Every structure is written in C-alpha cells, then in structure tokens.
Image (spheres, grey):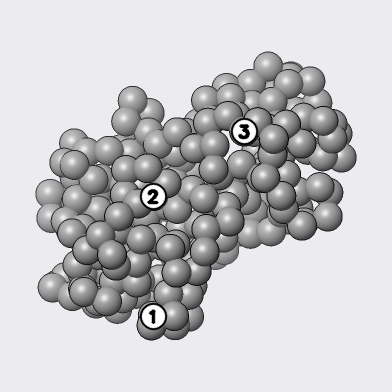
Amino acid sequence: MTVLLTVAGTWNGANYADALEGGGTGIDMLSCINGQYSPIISQPANTGYKDIFIFHDAVVDPITSVKTYLQQFGTGTGFSYGGANTAATDYSHVTKGILALGNADTMGAGVANNSDGFGGGLHIDMDWDVTTANQFLGSRVGTLKRIYGDNGGPTGDGRNLATAFTLVADAMSNSQNTGVEIAPTAAVAGSIGRKFSVNAASAALLGDLGHVRMRFFLRTDATEGGIMQWEWVIAYSFTA
C-alpha cells in the first residue's frame, strides 16, 4: 500500500497549507531583507525559523532513504507560478536562482544569524534539538546544516535526487505521542520509524519524526527583489 508523508509545523499537525502566490498551498518562508534571514524574530538573538516535522502513516515498516532537494516550481505540484520572474529563473538562473543564491553563501564559520551579511539561499538545519546559539551556524555546513545549491549553484548540491541531502540521524526524534521529544536510542540516517501511536518500539528505536528547521538568507549585496518560488521535494522509500 502507499505510504504517505505529512509535512507539518507541529509534531502531530496537518500538512503545511500556506497560501501561495499564483494559487496552491505550501510553505511560505515569508519576506526577507538584505543582510537578514526569514522567518526572523530577532537577528541579534538568532531566533526565527520555519519548524518542519516529517512523519508518515506506515504500519508495517519504517520509511528509509529520506532525502530532500529542490526543483523548479510547478514541476511536481502543477501549480501556476506567481513570482516576480519565471519559475526557471527562480530555480536555475546562474545569479538570480535559489541554487545560485545558496552557492554565493560565504557566511562566516562562527556566524549563524547573517550578521556579516554573507548568508544566502535556503538552509536546512537537521539537528532537532540544536541550541538557539548554534542553529544555522556557518561552521556546521556540510554536516548538520546544508545549503541548497552549495558547491556549484545550478550544478551544485541538493538540486536533484542524485545530489539530494539525506536526512541525518540527528534529525530524528521520538514524539512519545505527547510532543515532548526525546532522542531515539538507535537513530539511522534516512530512516523514520512508525508513529508512537502505531508502534512505540519503532518510535523509541528510530524516532517517529524527522524534525528540521529552515531559513532563507539574503546577502547584503543582493540586488533582486520580488517573490521567489521553488519546490522542496522529499524523496523516500517504503514497503507498507
């Protein structure tokens, strides 16, 4: 049988359904100004991010090979583009696209909040219980934090299934069916166990949530404005 994901803002919530320009629903990263990030609460305090919980309805086995990547808006959803340029420009343009913005990121290793103005693109932090001070820290790029388009922009990381980012073991948590998350006893990269309410042992072993945080960063020297749109894709393998 088909195993379906839920991509929610809470541990037991419904799929994200923010209204998107052009029609359709998804995740709205909100607006961002030069030298900052979005969603933002306080830049000096390094607070603000999009909280994303990934879980599934399998009853027999965990899902495996969970990976994420970006693709051109409308490719998978069929939604009409409602941005400021074109769907292709927003995705793969060599300077304006989301992948190019990620490749241009040179935020300092000791910087997490874009205080140096060199942060760019879409960042994913895959440590579910990362501290406020360390979340999105530049020194964590390549391990617990990844940047879509890093190392090549339109030919860089996280641009398709072949270059997708595997969900690391640190992203897995056990909801305990209460929302009070704890670390699973034997988390495995790319594997999310069955929900605690379905199989508590699976949730305790592997975790029943993939819990990540996302931010969009904009360099101080960025010149393009307007709405950008792209698709964030989660790929996974399942049995039943």
Q: Amino acid at mark 1?
A: Gln
Q: Which quarter of the rendering shows the C terminus?
A: top right
Across and down, in percent, residue 161 comes to: 38, 28
- In space, the residues marked 1 and 3 are separated at their CA atoms by 32 Å
Q: Earlier in the sequence, mark 1 or mark 3?
A: 1
Q: Which quarter of the rendering shows the N terminus?
A: top right
The residue lying at 87 percent from left, 40 percent from top is 197
The residue lying at 53 percent from left, 30 percent from top is 190
| Circle nearer the viewer, 1 or 3 | 3
Question: Which residue is tagged 3?
Answer: 187
The residue lying at 35 percent from left, 51 percent from top is 140
Write down the quadrant of residue 107 in the picture: bottom left
Q: Is residue 44 above or below residue 109?
A: below
The residue lying at 79 percent from left, 20 percent from top is 60
Q: Earlier in the sequence, mark 2 or mark 1?
A: 1
Q: How many neighbours does mark 1 have within 10 angstroms: few (below 14), some (14-19), or many (20 or more)? A: some
- In space, the residues marked 2 and 1 are separated at their CA atoms by 18 Å
| Circle nearer the viewer, 2 or 3 | 3
Q: Quick check: can you spot residue 134?
A: yes
Q: Earlier in the sequence, mark 2 or mark 3?
A: 2
For this view, does 88 lie left or right of residue 21?
A: left
The kind of secondary structure element at disc 2 is strand
The kind of secondary structure element at disc 1 is loop
Question: Which residue is tagged 2?
Answer: 145
The kind of secondary structure element at disc 3 is loop
Q: Amino acid at mark 3?
A: Ala
Q: How many neighbours does mark 2 have within 10 angstroms: few (below 14), some (14-19), or many (20 or more)? A: many
For this view, does 6 lie left or right of residue 22?
A: right
Question: Which residue is tagged 1?
Answer: 43
Across and down, in percent, residue 63 comes to: 64, 26
Across and down, in percent, residue 18 comes to: 57, 63
Q: Amino acid at mark 2?
A: Lys
